[in-house]
C-alpha cells in the first residue's frame, strides 16, 4: 500500500477499510495498555446506528472493467452517541475484509475505532485505534501472486493515538497475529494486541483538525452542497472535500487533499446515504484501492450480520 509519507489513491483502501494508512515502522503497536473506549469512562450510551455490507470487486485494465465478482468480502460500520452530564461523545467503528474462500486464499482486512468527546466548556478530546493488513501489490501481476493462503502468522499494521492540549500523540507499527484470523474477529483482535516494550510515540498539532471517520461523518450529516474538513493522517495534515450535486442530496462525491501550502489530490471516492437517515453511515461506498481494482460496499439483505460490540461501558437506562 505504499510507504513513507506519500499518500496516493492506493492508500484509500486504508481509509475506507477503517483508518488512514500508517507506513510500517519498526515493531510497534498500540499505546501502552490504553484503548479508545477509555475516553468514554463515565459516559452512558444514548444512541446507536449500524450497517453491514457486502463487498463486490471489479478488475480493471486501463480503467476498463475486465470482470466482476460479488461477495468477495464483507464489512460493518457503527456510530454511537453518548452523554456524561453536559459532555457529548461520538464513537465510530468501521471494519471490512475479504472472504479467503472466495479470493483464492487472500486474507485482507482492516478496522478503525474512533472516539470524540465534546466537553461543555468547548474543548474536545479524541482517541483512535486501528489495525490493517498491509497490501504491497503495485500491479495486477503482483496481485495474482498474492492470491494464496497464508500459513502460520501474518503481519498487520496497528496504530493508536489520543489528543491532549491541542496535540495528537500516536504510535504505529507491525505485529503478528494468527493467519487464520479474519475480519469477523477484528474487534476482539484489536482489543488483544499488546505493544512491545520501549515503543516511542510521536506528536503532531491538531490545529482544529479531527480524525478521518469523524470527518467523513461530519460531511455526511452536514447536508450542505459542499463541505471541507481538515484531518490528521499519521501526524500529517490532510483535507476532506465533499460535494453534492443539485437534486441528488443523498449522493456525495469526495476528494482527499494534502494539507500543504500546495495541495494535491490524493484520492477520490463516492458514497450514498439513505434519505432522512441521521446515522451518517453510507449505504454504499465505491472506490479504487488499486489502479486495477474497484471495490463497492453495498448494504444488502445477503450481507453477513455481525455482532458489533459497543464502545460504551454504560448504556442508556
Image: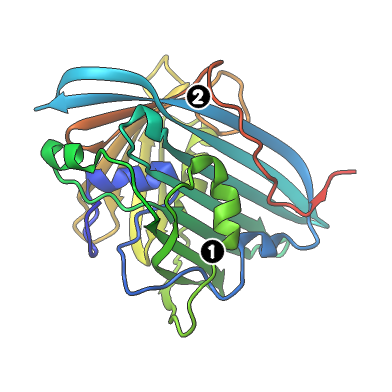
Q: Residue at x 54, y 32 (%)?
A: 281
Q: Does the image show residue 59?
A: yes
Label 2: few (<14), some (14–19) or many (≥20) C-alpha neighbours in 10 Å: some
Estimate the x, y position of residue 152 in percent, counting from the top left. Answer: 39, 55
Q: Which residue is mark 1?
A: 193
Estimate the x, y position of residue 195 in percent, counting from the top left. Answer: 51, 73
Q: Nearer the viewer, residue 121 or 13?
A: 13
Q: Earlier in the sequence, mark 2 or mark 1?
A: 1
Q: Residue at x 25, y 38 (%)?
A: 147
Query: On the picture, is 188 further left or further right than 3?
Result: right
Query: On the picture, is 147 further left or further right than 45?
Result: left
Q: Residue furthest bottom?
A: 198
Quadrant for residue 285, please give it: top left
Estimate the x, y position of residue 145 in percent, counting from the top left. Answer: 18, 41
User: If the image is split into quadrants, where does the C terminus sit?
Assistant: top right
- Colour scheme shown: rainbow
Q: Secondary structure at mark 1?
A: loop
| C-alpha span from label 2 to label 1 | 30 Å
| Cβ–Cβ under 8 Å for marks 2 and 1 | no
Query: On the picture, is 98 further left or further right than 169?
Result: left
Q: Nearer the viewer, residue 73 or 80?
A: 73
Q: Nearer the viewer, residue 151 or 276?
A: 151
Amino acid at each position: 500500500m505504499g510507504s513513507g509519507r506519500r499518500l496516493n489513491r492506493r492508500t484509500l483502501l486504508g481509509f475506507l477499510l477503517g483508518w488512514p494508512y500508517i507506513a510500517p515502522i519498526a515493531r510497534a503497536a498500540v499505546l501502552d495498555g490504553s484503548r479508545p473506549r477509555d475516553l468514554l469512562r463515565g459516559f452512558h450510551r444514548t444512541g446507536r446506528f449500524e450497517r453491514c455490507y457486502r463487498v463486490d470487486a471489479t478488475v480493471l485494465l486501463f480503467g476498463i472493467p475486465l470482470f466482476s465478482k460479488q461477495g468477495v468480502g464483507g464489512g460493518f460500520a457503527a456510530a454511537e452517541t453518548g452523554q456524561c452530564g453536559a459532555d457529548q461523545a461520538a464513537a465510530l467503528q468501521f471494519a471490512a475484509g475479504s472472504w479467503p474462500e472466495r479470493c483464492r486464499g487472500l486474507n485482507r482486512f482492516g478496522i478503525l475505532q474512533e472516539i470524540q468527546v465534546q466537553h461543555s466548556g468547548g474543548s474536545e478530546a479524541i482517541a483512535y485505534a486501528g489495525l490493517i493488513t498491509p497490501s504491497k501489490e503495485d500491479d495486477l501481476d503482483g496481485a495474482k501472486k498474492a492470491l494464496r493462503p497464508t500459513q502460520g502468522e501474518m503481519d498487520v499494521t496497528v496504530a493508536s493515538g489520543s489528543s491532549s492540549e491541542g496535540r495528537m500523540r500516536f504510535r504505529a507499527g507491525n505485529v503478528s497475529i494468527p493467519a487464520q484470523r479474519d475480519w469477523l474477529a477484528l474487534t476482539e483482535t484489536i482489543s488483544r494486541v499488546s505493544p512491545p516494550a520501549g515503543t516511542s510515540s510521536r506528536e503532531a498539532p491538531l490545529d482544529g483538525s479531527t480524525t478521518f471517520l469523524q470527518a467523513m461523518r461530519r460531511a455526511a450529516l452536514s447536508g450542505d452542497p459542499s463541505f471541507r474538513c481538515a484531518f490528521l493522517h499519521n501526524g500529517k495534515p490532510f483535507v476532506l472535500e465533499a460535494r453534492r450535486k443539485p437534486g441528488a442530496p443523498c449522493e456525495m462525491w469526495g476528494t482527499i487533499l494534502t494539507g500543504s501550502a500546495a495541495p494535491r489530490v490524493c484520492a477520490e471516492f463516492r458514497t450514498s446515504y439513505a434519505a432522512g437517515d441521521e446515522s451518517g453511515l453510507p449505504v454504499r461506498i465505491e472506490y479504487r484501492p488499486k489502479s486495477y481494482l474497484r471495490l463497492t460496499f453495498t448494504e444488502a439483505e445477503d450481507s453477513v450480520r455481525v455482532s458489533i460490540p459497543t464502545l460504551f461501558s454504560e448504556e442508556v437506562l
